[in-house]
Image: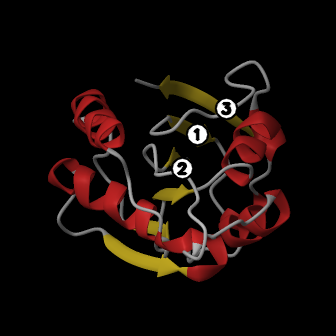
Amino acid sequence: MLRIIIMRHAQAQLEQYGKSDRERTITMAGMHEIDAIRQQIQGKLVGVSLIMCSNARRTRQTLDGIKPVLPNSAEIHYDDSLYNAGLECLWHKIQTLSPLHKNIMILGHNPGISQVVNAIDSSVARVFPTCGVAICESSVDKWHEISPHNMRVVSFLQV
């Protein structure tokens, strides 16, 4: 069985003229979201061996906020290509994962995060909320075999 935890970053500042979107930071409300979701995901991330996180500042801040409930042994890969990644890019990343990992986490952005979860189960969340978490499982054993058709959302958490 393969498991993917899909998470969207916490609420971020609005875009500001002259500042890069990648450098937007989370807001005070976003910090409260992280505190609330950290309590909900405690104990649900056991076995996560790889975390793929967008290199945007708000995703890194979100990851920092949930680190206390993540396994210490989990590898963290900051990946620029996750920034504004769409459905095809995210599926490609998933399908080309090392067989050493059976339980992974992706921390990224909309619309890609919503697209992946909606491809698995469109009844879960039309628009994936900030700090939302979808825990998905598949009965297949190899990442290259995974698809929205052989996955299911087993839990959806939001604040």
Residue depicted at 77% across the width and 40% down the height = 150
Q: Which residue is mark 3?
A: 152
Q: Sequence order check: which comes first, mark 1 or mark 2?
A: 2
In-front residue for pair 22/98: 22
Neighbour tally class for label 2: few under 14, some 14-19, many 20 plus, Cα within 10 Å: many
Residue 43 placement (x, y as % from top left): 23, 36
Marks 3/2: CA distance? Answer: 10 Å
Q: Is residue 43 visible?
A: no
Residue 116 placement (x, y as % from top left): 74, 46
Q: Which residue is mark 2?
A: 4
Amino acid type indicated by mark 1: Glu
Marks 1/3: CA distance? Answer: 6 Å
| 10 left or right, relative to 41 | right
Q: Which residue is mark 1?
A: 137
In-front residue for pair 25/47: 25
Tag 1 secondary structure: strand
Tag 2 secondary structure: strand
Q: Are marks 1 and 2 in contact (CB under 8 Å)?
A: yes
Amino acid type indicated by mark 2: Ile
Residue depicted at 27% across the width and 43% down the height = 31
